[in-house]
Image: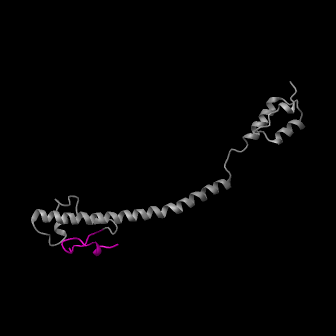
Amino acid sequence: MAKRSPETFNIGPITLVVFVKTIVFGLFRPDSLLEREIKMFRFRKKGVTLIELLIVVLILAALSAIAIPRISQSATNAKKKACHTNLDVINSSIEMYNADTGGYPADLTTITQDTSYFPDGEPKCPVLDAVYPDTLVNNRVDASSHSH
């Protein structure tokens, strides 16, 4: 076996502890034992500590605390906009009824029950999950009578 000198020994990623062990236990140590010890020292930590796991859980909790209220708020806003769109569609159907018959309907059920205007059935408010008020104001569905 060749004698190893400290000048040719690469200390780069190896810590000083391994280097000192090499000098203390002799420079004539077999290379396989030294390499095995270096490998064991480099790859000793393979798991996740409890602190690291807790930090990840806390970060995820903080992100979800920010995201969940925004998602629920956007769902409510989407339902309100869908309700407003339904009111616009009903008012457009009233105008179509006027163009077809030459007069406005007496109440809203005249149009909402007619499958030629609403083939999928009577529109419901997505927020309240209820039908729209049957009264017409100036031949239109008044959005102020249906508030949420």
Give, as a single range, the part of the protein colored magenta. Answer: 130-148
- Magenta region includes residue 146: yes
Query: Is 148 rendered above or below residue 121?
Result: below
- Magenta region includes residue 39: no
Task: Compare residues 74 and 123 and report the one nearer the observer.
Answer: 74
Residue 61 left/right relative to 104: right
Q: Residue at x 28, y 72 (%)?
A: 143
Q: Is residue 113 visible?
A: no
The percent position of residue 130, horizontal first and vertical second, equals 29, 69
The percent position of residue 145, horizontal first and vertical second, equals 28, 75
Quadrant position of residue 126: bottom left
The percent position of residue 60, horizontal first and vertical second, equals 57, 57
Query: Is 53 rendered above or below residue 17?
Result: below
Farthest residue, direction top: 1
Query: Is 1 rendered above or below residue 51?
Result: above
Q: Quadrant of the N terminus?
A: top right
The percent position of residue 99, horizontal first and vertical second, equals 12, 63
Quadrant position of residue 117: bottom left
Q: Quadrant of the C terminus?
A: bottom left
Q: Is residue 45 visible?
A: yes
Task: Compare residues 66 and 39 and report the one nearer the observer.
Answer: 66
Q: Residue at x 20, y 58 (%)?
A: 119
